Image (cartoon, rainbow, N blue to C red):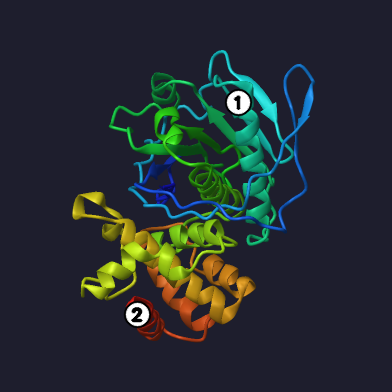
Amino acid sequence: MPARRCRMPWSALRARVTVAALVGAATLGASGCSDGPPEPTTTTPSGRSAATELPATPEPAPTPRPTLAPRTPGTDLAPAPLPGARTVIGRFSTVSGTVDEATLTAYATMADRAVAQVERHWTRPWSRRLTVVAPADTSAFRELVGRPDDLSQVAAVTEGPLDPTTGLASADRIVLNPDAFATLTTTGRQFVLTHEGTHVAVRSSLAGAAPLWLTEGYADHVGYSGSGRRTTELAAALLAEVDAGRGPTRLPTLADFDPAQGEIAPTYLASWLAVDLVARRHGAATLQRFYEASVVDGSPAQAEAATDRAFAEVLGTTRAEFTRRWLSELALLAGPK
């Protein structure tokens, strides 16, 4: 099962941001897709080019996990390099690492597909390029991200400085945890890179932060798009909770994403289905406007207040009415099939 990245960038003073995608418990198989991007070409440092076959569009079923706390202000802004790394250049990606060249090439192909998928959804200008770092061992991964806590389930960490003037990220990179990433299927790995790529695109083109349910739900919306799987299948963990009478009663709050409070996979699925409801009822362009209107350079409470205004001004509804409709849909999905 793929993993998740949670973004919690509410500190206006933070010089560097780190976020993580964490490994879940299972993975669904991949399905074919006829509308993928053109076949990318990767180039190694020697100048040799190699055509790489695009993988099938992913059908992810990730179990999300918690956000890594951001680094404190005043830490180094320049990401630490990976000694001895070789680099593969994809059409929309740069992948460096100490794993073998075939693996780097495969990751570049996935990152290229992730960029193309993000481009279908997020229309604000961004670099349309992902930087991925793939160390071969966990100790190198830990040194790169500079964290002492347990990262055994973390599949990837996205980190990068925020411009102190614009508040935009301009040099994000996705660092893969070799042990955890290796446990994922191709589908799971693709989902991680697409989900993370969505955050990279948003962070580099929109300063501030939306409520976490919207941030993560939107990235999942992009990651799940084109999967070809039924909503009831992808959201099974959440719908089981709803069927048992333990489903959500309101849109997820920051505390709902805390793993110390219990299983959080349903929280991510609930966020995804809330965002998906906006997309289905109002369309992709309005969903993006709703997201943009919900972003503030302030606290989580200020972001929620901005979202309340966006419900009225962009969607023509209220949080209460939207929540009622969303909960009604969850009940229908969890009902007899």
Q: Position of residue 72 (x, y in %)?
A: 37, 36
Q: Is residue 261 above or below residue 140?
A: below
Q: Is residue 23 visible?
A: yes
Q: Give me the disc on residue 271.
A: none
Q: Is residue 146 above or below residue 126?
A: above
Answer with left or right where residue 177 lies relative to residue 221: left
**Secondary structure under the numbered disc 1 in the rendered image:** strand
Q: Which residue is mark 2?
A: 327
Q: Residue at x 38, y 79 (%)?
A: 337
Please tell me which residue lies in front, 25 or 336.
336
Q: Position of residue 129 (x, y in %)?
A: 67, 42
Please tell me which residue lies in front, 189 or 314.
189
Q: Is residue 15 visible?
A: no
Q: Give me the disc on residue 96.
A: 1
Q: Residue at x 47, y 57 (%)?
A: 209
Q: Position of residue 292 (x, y in %)?
A: 55, 65
Mark 1, other Cα within 10 Å: few <14 / some 14–19 / many ≥20:
many
Q: Is residue 133 above or below residue 25?
A: above
Answer with left or right where residue 17 lies relative to residue 261: right
Answer with left or right where residue 103 lies relative to residue 141: right
Amino acid type at circle 2 is Leu
Q: Quadrant of residue 178?
A: top left
